[in-house]
Image: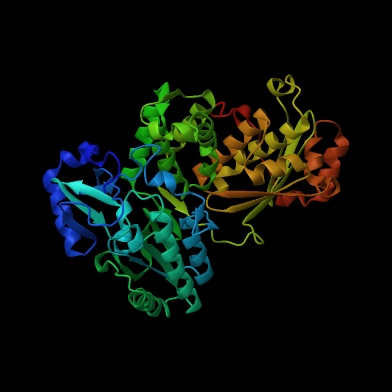
Amino acid sequence: MLNEGSSKVKNHKGATDFHDEILAYLLKEATYGAIIGPFDKNPFSCHFKISPLNSVYKKDSVERRVILDLSFPPGRSVNDFISKDVYLSERVQLLYPKVDDLVGIIKDKGGKCLVFKKDLKRAYRQIPIDPGDLHLVGFQWDNKLFADRVLPMGLRSSALICQRITTAVSFMFYKMGYMVINYLDDFGGADTVDKADEAYIALGALLDSCGLEESKQKGVAPTTRMEFLGITVDTVKLTLEVTSDRVLEISLLVQAWLRKKKASLRELQSILGKLHFVSTCVRPGRLFVSRLLNWLRSAFPSNVVGSGHKIYRKIPVEVQKDLLWWHRFLSSYNGISMMSLEDWSSPDEIFSSDACLEGFGAITSNQYFHAVFPSDITKDQLHINCLELLAIVVAVKIWGKTFCGKKILIFCDNEASVQVINSGSSKDAFMQTCLRELCFIQASFQFEVRARHILGVENRLADYLSRWHCSHKYRELFKSAISVDRYEEVPVLMSDFSFLNNW
């Protein structure tokens, strides 16, 4: 028999309004042996679960992607009986690799290595499902019954199953002596110039031996420049690039959000996805999706997800601050960022800083500065932790242009400041504001920072600078500890204390 109420299951408008496209899809899937049918009645000896069809436009295409809505009806759908956390009686967690992981392979193989890519043809649609489950993936069209024989678009476990299969391929490839990452049906790898062609051919042979058909036209033979997961990787320039059109698209979306008062779950998920995408290249930007993620979890709990397009929530001020950061940054971002390949054991530049309740200072390999905090700062009687971090922000504002494309190591004797910089978070509002200003400068000039805690006795030069205003003694101690002719004193301007915005 059919499932209860199956005769009342209606396909969605995304299917019924595109009759010819759905019919063409069914004919194509039949030639691949991916569906069974048409049937006039239930072909199984058990119940036959019917779910509605839908379709959406593929990205940057006039073609439509057909989806079997296995989340309908809510509470009684096929997906309602599939756990997100358990698969084949084992606890699972679906984790996808990132472009950072491909960069890690490039780092291992060295600059100017060759990158390559292969793609499975039809993705989920070449992976068969258990014949015992065919009765659960039924649908109807033109009063005829059909069932999928392969993983449907719309099945909760499809992505997990596909990722497990391609992960197994990556593991076998690793055992063969090569390195590749897999994102669902996409494989991206890198190798040295003398081994890259061999690795590329070996991956194709491995896919074939596993019975997996690759999409020949989507494969990219070994090269120094390749797009992977929407990001262009260049192993000669050692850059990650986002197209200017994509930057403009996301920038306009952020501007639209800054004018909004309320947003739905789907709108929030959409902008989060785009900001995560840009954050692939802009590492400091990863901090500036945290408030959006927190809002997602608190304002849209799992029990309202199914109505995510209908329920609107007021956008919090803190979320608007994240969006303002992105607006300021994207307005000047050219879409190109440097890869992070260098070893932190050999940073490009080191500076140390220190602060007391009235003054502060910092020193690099050839420059130094010192100043007292302006009255606007001292009147607030900030904690020393805040002043120490503010001193670092001022230092980065002064030297930021000279740090472009470099790895900067900061020596600081304040543990709280070191932790905030390295963790990217703080519960203190002022320190959080400092951190966001620091990240904006990092992103603008494309450099990275890490902080290392040192004992106060090891931070003598910066300590002398922070107390320069207190007594001639500290000035003399500083000058006697350095070769004065090797260092240049740089001024501290009032504008160095002005943040672009109250992030």
Residue 149 coordinates in the image, percent (x, y): 28, 60
Q: Residue at horizontal 78%, vertical 28%?
A: 358
Snapshot quadrant of residue 497: top right
Residue 254 coordinates in the image, percent (x, y): 40, 32
Above or below 299: residue 343: below
Q: Is residue 308 visible?
A: no
Residue 59 coordinates in the image, percent (x, y): 27, 47
- Tell which of 434 and 354 is nearer to you: 434
Q: Residue furthest right?
A: 473
Numbered label tally: 0
Q: Residue at horizontal 52%, vertical 63%?
A: 104
Figure colour scheme? rainbow
**As drawn, is 431 to the left or to the right of 48?**
right
Above or below 225: residue 57: above
- Tell which of 466 and 207 is nearer to you: 207
Q: Is residue 238 visible?
A: yes
